[in-house]
Amino acid sequence: MIPKIIIVIPTIRKNSINRFLKEWKQEFLNNKKFDVNLLIIEDNPQKTFDLKQKNLIHYSWEDIEKDLGKNSWIIPRRTDCIRSYGYWKAFQKNPNMIITLDDDCYPLKKHFTKTKNKKKFLQTHWDALNKGINIQENYWITTIKDLRPRGIPYKKRIKIKKYKNIILNHGLWYNVPDLDGKTQLSMERVSGLNNYAINQIIPKNKYYPMCGMNLAWKPEATPALFFLLMGQNENNKYWGFDRFGDIWSGIIFKKIADHLGYNISSGNPIIWHDRASNANVNFEKEKSGLRINEYFWQMIDEINLTKNNFKDCYKQIAQKLPSKNIYFIKLKKAMKLWINLFQKLKK
């Protein structure tokens, strides 16, 4: 049986999503190795453009409200975190793998010919989750800083280690890196960078900045991938934070994955990220969340997990997350309602 893959893409502009569909057409539309389906989540009250492609479903706010009713507020608007709705819809379709991409991400080989990875995008994600990845690791560490102690081999310090049991593969990007506004403002030039990607396993009990531009995961982990309350709510009121939904979600997910004994890989497949975001706008959006970001991971790290699956562990975090202010009180409620969406499904 051909593996079924569902790809979730949030968008707001017709030109962006049309270019996305055109550039990925060869791999996503007539793929002989995978049954590929696209879920487009348009961040508008109603659909404002038509998308005509046979393997595509197009959603908007009205679909969220129809499906979730009085609880539709848990899906934020005017933010890429609206993609969480797509995750839930993808989960219901019983895929073998779920992927999310931004609408300004394109196949690397069309824009950067120096790529060493000959496998296609979908195959690379699939192999990471189902076959594992090989990582070069240094089996020697120095005992003093900036000097070479006697006895360290000059050449044969590296071994290849095979890592399996990967639950999520965090793909990276060339051209426009995922930097925060503060860092972008401190740099003279951001776009054009390449060859800075690292292929690695994220060590146990350590965290990493999970970017939602290029992710693949096994469907059973979906209940723990709610992108948090960012941007606006359904009444166009600002939640108070933006551009931390994927980062904070990644912290929670890593905590659960470590507890359950899963690995998370980061690196290939690399995509081409083509839009240079506005550094000043990003800085303003991120400013309110910078202080909380300094300790959010510590709050999650201190939670003791005792359950044995993603749904129950996520519910446990929602229950134990400190109620520091109104935002966290609402967030805890949203997280519980999110997990209830999966508890009600007959799976």
Image: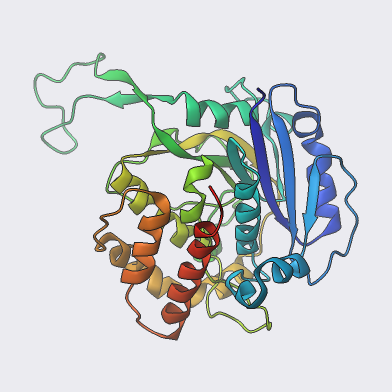
Taking the image as shown, residue 50 lies to the left or right of residue 285, namely right
Identify the residue at image location x=44%, y=85%. 326
Instruction: Residue 283 in the image: state x and y as whole percent.
Output: 55, 70
Which quadrant: the N terminus? top right
| Closest to the observer, 63 or 301 | 63
Taking the image as shown, residue 26 lies to the left or right of residue 175, namely right
Q: Is residue 177 above or below residue 67?
A: above
Identify the residue at image location x=30%, y=53%. 307
Q: Is residue 286 above or below residue 268?
A: below
Identify the residue at image location x=56%, y=79%. 239
| Closest to the observer, 23 or 95 | 95
- Name which quarter of the figure residue 112 lies in: top right
Instruction: Residue 90 in the image: state x and y as whole percent.
Output: 64, 48
Q: In this view, does 329 lie above or below 210?
A: below
Q: In this view, does 106 lie above or below 161?
A: below
| Closest to the observer, 313 or 248 | 313
Instruction: Residue 188 in the image: state x and y as whole percent.
Output: 57, 57
Q: Is residue 218 visible?
A: yes
Q: Residue furthest top?
A: 156
The scheme the figure's colours follow is rainbow
Q: Is residue 180 visible?
A: no
Instruction: Residue 36 in the image: state x and y as whole percent.
Output: 72, 35
Q: How many marks?
A: 0
